[in-house]
Amino acid sequence: MAYEDLKLKAEEIKNILKIEDIISSYISIKRAGKNYTALCPFHAEDTPSFYIFPETQTYHCFGCGAHGDAITFIKEYENKSFMDALKKCADMAGVNLDLKSHKKPKEIELNESLNKFYIDRLLNLPSYHKVWEFLKNRNINKDTAEEFEFGYSTGEEIEKVLEDTLIEKEIAVNSGLIKNDRDFFNGRLIIPIRDNNSSLVGFAGRLIENVNSPKYINSQENKYFKKSKILYMYHKTKSIIQKNDFAIITEGYFDAISMYKMGFKNIVAVLGSNLTKDHAFELFKSTNKIITMFDMDKAGEKATISSIDLLFEKGFQVAVANYDAKDPDELTKKHDKKYIAEILKKSYKFHEYIVDVKAKDYDLKNEFAVEEYLKEMAIWYKKIQQSNRFEIMEVFSEKISEKIDREKDFVKKVLIELSKNLKINNIKINESKQKTQITEKEIRYDLGKSFIYLWLKFPEYRKKIESVQEDILPENPLREFITSLKEGKELSQIIEDSSEELSQIISEIWKVDYIFEPERIYSKLMKSIDRINILKKIESLKDELKNTEEPYIRANITKDIIKLYSKLKKHGGNI
């Protein structure tokens, strides 16, 4: 199906479905006038900022900016590809959707074809081959190898695939599948990497002999393969994560596979890099509860702390698994499922883990070391405080007092003093609060913001303020907003069609969570608009004065200008 035909089909489907019916089948919604509101499913919040607009068949979250139609909602909520979401909507609407002619990008098509060759090569190697010996040592048999699509490269596969598919060699080179005119993964176990929507976007190649080369190599990054956005196995496990309402995060491919085989199928792995904000965003669609299970070494500790920092900032509940093996892969070989389940059940709360793991860096028998340790703990105390997780602060202080053998009240007092002047830049909650503290001043002395604030927060003022003639205003977001209102656009349409500047102002004002005196803002707004009208009239009269020679007319115009300046003085101040 051609792209334009696909667009037409999508419009046909959206015209049949009601967005409020689609979204209400996933989350609880409430009517709000002509529209509906709900707690946003895409970010953590206590006050509804997610709006559904039946008239335009769109939704918008004023908290996180999530926006779209019924197809977009299913795509984002269920972590589906656009095509899968479209197909689901087509089924709901009873529309026949022929996707047979829809073509995959050539890069993905090449990966899929090459993967079949790699798999076939592995499955036809004799059981005594070195790659099968390697897999047997990992407790991976033929069935598991097939389930995870493992393959093997002899260096010949890529040329055969290019001959069979007639795909240009340049695409293979640009994808990093060919280096120095040979298969990049030659002689390695192949682990295919699918993105979060199941498209095969790249490969990992695992060395199976001890030679002077990197143990793992990955496809080079391109527009489809970005390690910072992909979690290994997430395409396979996201529905299980959603059902269990928590995810286990590991470092390596075999860590995740071993845990999955053991029965812990709500598992993912990072692709040899730190957890990123994009990973966190994807996971948040399925759960806000995470257990980290990184390697039990110094690098693993560092990765754990980094992940806690990121996940805590994004509103996750985080725990840390503590176990007696170097990594989860080894753990599954040493212990049974019941034992590992108990380990997961007894996972550290993140704040307890921080207290313990950071204590290893200090000699806590030394007073100076204790002082430095407390300075580091004060940073986390501040983060916890700024995120309003007050219930944690008490436990955190108590855990530190046990660790350094000091009274809890003393520790708490020290943490409060040390954290007073700390600035934690990555805590977004704090940033938004600081912004809110100056919002009233911004609103009162900004014509556009005061107008939009009254319109959004106080519908009873809409008729009073919508009479403003937009042509008196300079080219700015307010003029754009008023023009859109007079064109009969709903708020969802305005957001969809507006400039980035106007969209940002609407979102910022929507997030103001306390009420300013509307009459004071309205009074200031009307004075500002009167002032603009007066200035416009003065400019117009000045133009007349330039073009008039008649003394009598010039005298009258001058009198009118003086009167207007006198009137302007009564308004005082700036707009």
Image (cartoon, rainbow, N blue to C red):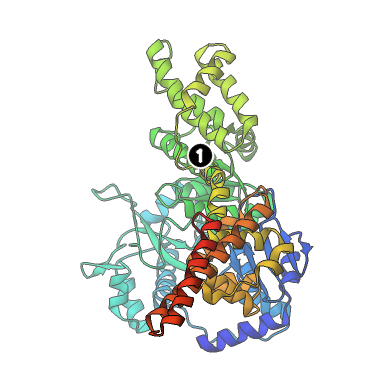
Q: Where is residue 216 in the image (x, y as percent from the top left)?
A: 34, 52
What residue is shown at x 55% (from left), y 30% (from top)?
351
Q: Where is residue 222 in the image (x, y as percent from the top left)?
A: 36, 66
Q: Position of residue 89 (x, y in %)?
A: 67, 76
* Quarter in which the N terminus is drawn: bottom right
Q: Position of residue 41 (x, y in %)?
A: 65, 57
Residue assigned mark 1: 308
The quarter holding residue 467 reads: bottom right
- The amino acid sitting under disc 1 is Ile
> Is 335 in front, or is 78?
78
What residue is shown at x 53% (from left), y 32% (from top)?
322
- Residue farthest toward the left in the current orientation of the protein: 180
Instruction: Work out whether residue 529 can be spotted.
Output: yes
The quarter holding residue 412 reads: top right
Instruction: Work out whether residue 324 can be spotted.
Output: no
Relative to 507, 366 lies left or right: left
Considering only vertical position in the picture, is 258 above or below 63? above
> Is 349 in front, or is 491?
491
The quarter holding residue 302 reads: top left
Considering only vertical position in the picture, is 202 above or below 408? below
> Is 111 in front, or is 7?
7
How packed mark 1 is, by other alpha carbons closer than 10 Å (few <14, some 14-19, many 20 or more), is many
Secondary structure beneath dot 1 equals: helix
